[in-house]
Amino acid sequence: MTFEPADRVDSVPPSGIRRFFELAEEMDDIISLGVGEPDFSAPWAAREAAIASLERGQTSYTANRGKRELRERIADYEAATHGLQYDPDEEILVTAGASEGIDLAFRALLNPGDSVAIAQPCYVSYVPGATFAGIDVVDVPTRAEDEFKLTREVLESSGAAEADALVYCYPNNPTGATMTDEEMAAVAAFCREHDLLVFADEIYADLTYEHDHTSIATLPEMRERTVVFNGFSKAFAMTGFRLGYAMAPPAAIEAMNRIHQYSMLSAPTTAQHAAIEALDNCRDEVTDMAAQYDRRRKYVLTRFEEMGLDCFPAAGAFYAFPECPWDDASEFAESLLQEERVAVVPGTAFGAGGSGHLRVSYATGLGDLKEAMARIESFLD
Amino acid sequence: MSSRREILDLLRENARYTTEDIARLTDYSESEVAEIIEEFEEAGIIRGYQAVVDWNAVESDEERVRATVELNVTLDRETSYDDISDRIAKFPEVTSLRLVSGDYDFDLEVQGDSMREVSHFISDKIAPIPEITQTVTHYIMESYKEQGMEFDDHDDDDRLSVSP
């Protein structure tokens, strides 16, 4: 007997960003616009709280669902910022990053052979996560002409009506697209009509620049069929803390916790202490960081316009998703990296609907961003 | 929509941003940015533009010494804090002067070519001012942060070059 990957592992190809990661890692002095995490450090008060918790010896497991104090803070925060009402005892599960929550939802709420409709391009983990859970994937490729929003037409034409659940992330990674109230209401109506569960990844909810975020769970008759995922990685710049949460009706949280209690036991304790402090005292930092992302977003979009590169007006997260001027976006990204030492990620790495585009992250200091855009301009000339 | 205040924030962050840069970073056009900056300058809201220099990193034979000085004063009916500050602020050696609350009244920053020069300045020019009752001088040994900028060498970006 030798070690061989199990079939479900073998069936998932390596991540599309891996090749660029490896290429970029071989090079010195590159400016990377390929980074999917904030360039800010976590707010100092949150870091201090983590240090203090260690000094106090708070290093044990917590309750499986997460510290109650944290779940209460999350409930208050979500009510205040996104209009979501969840009971901290029964409807919130603290996870090791939003990614764990999504994985739990796939495994705990769907059966092998069920199918999920995944709005794409999307975060790289959704499709493999579904595959690992034995779930079939229905690609829902959003379109540049719709500004990468989910529309009824796209849902209908992709066959999403036949799926058991819809998975999406808005504000979106990799496109930076957001959904307005009306647009989200149309998606909600479709899900009600076709009896779809909804797995709504709202990790970038606090990073919107043109209009407020609308959570689908606030729309009529949607709360009972929706799991909302969020976390501290993006808005609070706490990626390395690995802390997220899922919010859903009790039956869903109970099922997800059943797996979580055996696989993770509980989310990292130190991170939970940091998160309590973040929610209590670091919201101003979130506002400041969002203001800086917004400036960079305007800068990047203006620069692309000046270069004659088509880019829809990305309004959330910290990504722009311009059209690639070459037929092959991977070739373009590789040449740009080799010749100008600027890393961007081809849209194909994020699945259906991403081809012909580039993901450009502006989670980078303005100085580097300015230099990177000048290099891209020079490369295009 | 951007606010005019945002232009001040940007210039505070980096005074070398061009009007073109600021226009790209805000909702204003380049001509609007130029106009607003001019208004700020004329109104005395923007008082000047300076580089933040880490003098310890400058290789030079010239010594540069800075000190912060705590000043206590006694006021009388004819003399106000403003009168005293007017007199002190005129000295070119004084780089900043602030009225503060707490154990002392003025917080003074002084710059000179040597500790001797700074000491002489305090004893010869500042201490003799009649209203000043006490001076306590603190020489600055090392700067770790100036005007919001940290002078550390460990700000390398250790994020993965490409990540999901």
Image (cartoon, coloured by chain):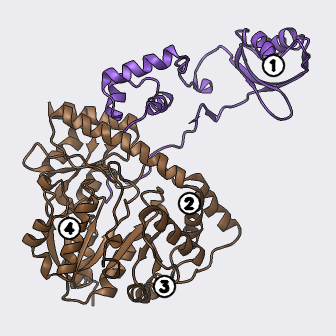
Chain colours: A brown, B purple
Q: Are marks 3 and 4 in contact (CB under 8 Å)?
A: no
Q: CA distance from mark 3 to mark 4?
A: 29 Å
What is the C-alpha distance between the residues marked 2 and 4? 34 Å
Q: Chain of mark 4?
A: A
Query: Judging from the image, what secondary structure is the residue with disc 3 in?
Result: loop
Answer few, some or many: residues within 10 Å of disc 1's Cα (few below 14, many 20 plus, some between 14 and 19).
some
Question: Which type of secondary structure does the marked residue at label 1 adopt?
Answer: helix
Reading the image, the residue beneath label 2 is A278
Residue kind at label 3, given as amino acid type: Glu
- The reply, left or right, for residue A68 in relation to residue A174 is right
Counting residues from the start of the chain, the first of labels 2 and 4 encountered is 4
Q: Circles 4 and 1: CB distance less than 8 Å? A: no
Q: Quadrant of residue B97?
A: top right
Quadrant where the N terminus of chain A sits is bottom left
Secondary structure beneath label 4: helix
Q: Are marks 1 and 3 in contact (CB under 8 Å)?
A: no
The residue pinned by badge 1 equals B81
Badge 3 sits on which subunit?
A
Q: For the residues marked 1 and 3, what is the alpha-carbon distance in whole angstroms? A: 62 Å
Q: Amino acid at mark 1?
A: Tyr
Q: CA distance from mark 2 to mark 1?
A: 42 Å
Classify A17 as above or below A34.
below
Residue B94, image x and y in percent? 72, 15
Which numbered circle lies on residue A186? 4
Q: Amino acid at mark 4?
A: Ala
Amino acid carrying mark 2 in the image = Ala
